[in-house]
Amino acid sequence: MDLIPHPADDAKLIATGRRVIAIEGAALGALAETLGADFARALGIILRARGRVIVSGMGKSGHVGRKIAATLASTGTPAMFVHPAEASHGDLGMITAADVVLLLSNSGETPELADMLAYAKRFQIPIIGVCGRAESTLTRQATVGIVLPPEAEACPVGLAPTTSTTMTLALGDAMAVALMEHRAFTPEDFRDFHPGGRLGARLATVGQLMHKGGELPLIGLDTPMSEALIEITHKGFGVAGVLDADGRLVGVITDGDLRRHMLGLLDRVAREVMTPGPLTISAGALASEALGIMNARKITTLFVTPAGAAPGTPALPAGILHVHDCLRAGIT
């Protein structure tokens, strides 16, 4: 192998990249066409399992297996990766009779998987095998074998795992999504598994970020404006919600309302100054939706109604959300 760098031929590099992607793309199309009864049987085994999906593979299959396990776990199917070599030195104890074993091996003859195969067979743990050979040891020993189509690797010598690992990864995604849809996995479920980072922020609800209880700036319809101003100043949101006799939010007083009624303001009561029918948002709505509304309306706060309250009708206020609450949570 020549390690001396040569001048780059950009056109050739781009052509190679496109060729590899085209080869792997065609292989994924072939994989989609070959999915059938064995795929459905494998998912049926997972759905009936009381435990987890134990994913394992060696080398590049192991790297792909870690990603498959992570995807399954984050989409409602309990899963974990167990390294086959570590399994032979004590980690077999992580696998229980309630689990399902998902073994990945392009050749179907990976020697490091032998102990896991034997262990699963001994304790009658279902085995799902994914490999590239229909007559391999893994396919014969598995409860269900999913055989990848015989597509060529994309590397020039046909040996480096490229096409085969791409197909395996896509198969794992197909399994995870099919299980999600069967279980009717919701955005709320997804948020529970992804509380951190940008994804968690995007899925945060108004109810998680809002201020509530004694923090809410609330006054009655007949509250003198002298008292209303104290409430607005004390609570620090720049607004006050106006409640009717039943405690339902029927109006809001903003700085704009104060300016419009500046003349004789202190001689008025809340009902004379407020804007009726205030814009609100449900506690169950996504905070990103609330931020979009505030940006579009050029306002900084929204009163929050209980989740499930009929939109557009007066309701007991559940909280208040400020634009800064969304920004602090990383919602942009």
Image (cartoon, helix red, strand yellow):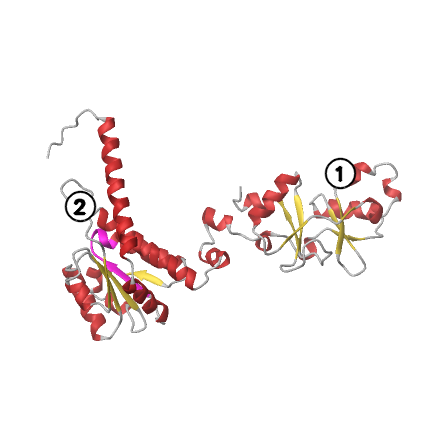
Question: Which residue extends farthest bottom?
Answer: 123
Q: Which residue is mark 2?
A: 160
User: What element does badge 1 sit on?
Assistant: helix
Which residue corresponds to the image point at 19% horizontal and 64% vertical from the top-left?
139
Mark 1 near mark 2, Cβ–Cβ under 8 Å? no
Specify the farthest residue to the left. Answer: 1
Residue 115 x, y percent position in the rendering: 17, 66
Identify which amino acid the numbered label 1 is placed on. Answer: Gly
Q: Secondary structure at mark 2?
A: loop
- Give me the residue at 78% from left, 52% from top: 219
Residue 195 place in picture, x, y as percent:
47, 54
Q: Earlier in the sequence, mark 1 or mark 2?
A: 2
Instruction: Give the CA distance from mark 1 to mark 2.
Output: 67 Å
Q: Is residue 58 magenta?
A: yes
Q: Start and end of the magenta stretch?
A: 53-62
Q: Is residue 81 magenta?
A: no
* Residue situated in front as seen by the camera: 322 or 167: 167
Q: Position of residue 73 (x, y in %)?
A: 37, 59
- Residue 262 occupies which quadrant of the picture? top right
* Circle 1 residue: 256
